[in-house]
């Protein structure tokens, strides 16, 4: 039987959406966010080791009230994230489901320097997680997977019987760059590899809950 005869019989089950989008017009906004966050770090140096530390191994993490800061650059970024999540909500595979009417969003900033990273974690109690990259520093190019974002295959047994040509059990990697937004289901286990290099790796993370 010709293989084309099987095309209608093939089902891709358990799909997992992930949006990875780069905004090419955010250079000026990123420069201002970079300064805002470094200034905030200086004002609140204790957040490097304080109660705000969660998945962070080293580094600085702000409180999760970032979207309440008065800076217009933060509001601009929130508008972009809102648009991306709205797109995902309206691209749902189950078309009969009603899209959410509203969303609740919380955000915080992470600043990592040489040797710092984020351990594997999820965002419990939320529907979507997201991360936006303000700056990625100057990573050492000789080190493989330096500072990358990685997602684990959410199917626990998928790697037990690898099939040639399929990526069962493999991690999905994202190479960060300034202006990139990544949105993913909040239950997906993800981590950030240690950053080795010069400067700061600055990201803004989001917890998003959909409201019907």
Image (cartoon, rainbow, N blue to C red):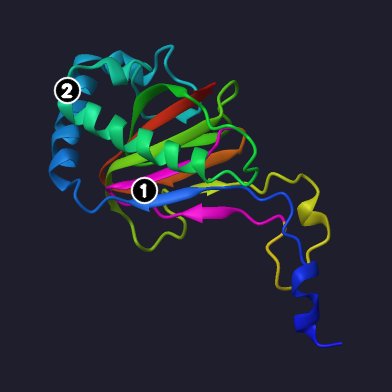
Residue pointed to by mark 2: 71
In which quadrant of the rendered image does the C terminus lie?
Answer: top right
SS assignment at label 1: loop
- Give x and y (percent) for residue 81: 36, 36
**Label 1 packing within 10 angstroms: few (<14), some (14-19), many (20+):** many
**Would residue 179 be counted in the magenta stretch?**
yes
Percent x, y for residue 209? 51, 23
Q: Between residues 88 and 23, which one lies in front from this camera angle?
A: 88
Q: Hey, which quadrant is residue 201 in on the image?
A: top left
Residue at (44, 43) in percent of width and height = 87
Q: Is residue 152 magenta?
A: no
Between 192 and 177, the residue placed more toward the observer is 177
The magenta stretch spans which residues? 169-186
> Is residue 80 left or right of 34 when viewed as pictured?
right
Q: Residue reaching furthest front?
A: 96
User: Which quadrant of the structure image shows residue 200?
Assistant: top left
Looking at the image, is 88 positioned above or below residue 68? below
Asked whether the viewer can see residue 40, the reply is yes
Q: Is residue 57 placed above or below 174 in the rendered structure? A: above
Judge depth for marks 1 and 2 and give the one in front.
Answer: 2
**First of labels 1, 2 by sequence position:** 2
Tally of numbered tags? 2
Place of residue 39 in the rendered image (x, y in percent of width and height, measured from the top left): 16, 23
User: Quick check: can you spot residue 148?
Assistant: no
State the separation of the CA atoms marked 1 and 2. Answer: 30 Å
Where disc 2 sits, the SS reads loop
Q: What number is the disc on residue 70?
A: none
Quadrant in the picture for residue 82: top left
Closest to the observer, 52 or 206: 206
Q: What is the number of the mark on residue 196?
A: 1
Residue found at x 60% / y 23%: 124
Residue 109 screen position, x and y as percent: 33, 27
């Amino acid at each position: 039987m010709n293989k084309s005869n099987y095309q209608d019989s093939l089902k891709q089950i358990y799909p997992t959406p992930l949006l990875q989008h780069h905004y090419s017009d955010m250079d000026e906004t990123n420069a201002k966010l970079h300064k805002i966050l470094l200034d905030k770090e200086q004002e609140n140096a204790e957040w490097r080791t304080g109660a705000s530390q969660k998945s962070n191994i080293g580094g600085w993490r702000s409180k999760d009230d970032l979207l309440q800061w008065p800076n217009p650059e933060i509001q601009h970024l929130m508008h972009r994230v809102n648009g991306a999540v709205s797109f995902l909500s309206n691209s749902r595979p189950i078309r009969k489901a009603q899209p959410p009417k509203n969303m609740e969003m919380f955000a915080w900033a992470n600043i990592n320097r040489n040797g710092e990273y984020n351990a594997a974690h999820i965002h419990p109690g939320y529907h979507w997680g997201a991360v936006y990259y303000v700056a990625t520093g100057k990573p050492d190019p000789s080190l493989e997977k330096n500072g990358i974002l990685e997602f684990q295959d959410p199917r626990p047994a998928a790697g037990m019987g690898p099939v040639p040509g399929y990526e069962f059990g493999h991690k999905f990697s994202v190479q960060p760059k300034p202006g990139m937004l990544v949105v993913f289901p909040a239950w997906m286990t993800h981590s950030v590899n240690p950053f080795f290099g010069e400067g700061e790796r600055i990201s803004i993370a989001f917890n998003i809950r959909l409201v019907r």
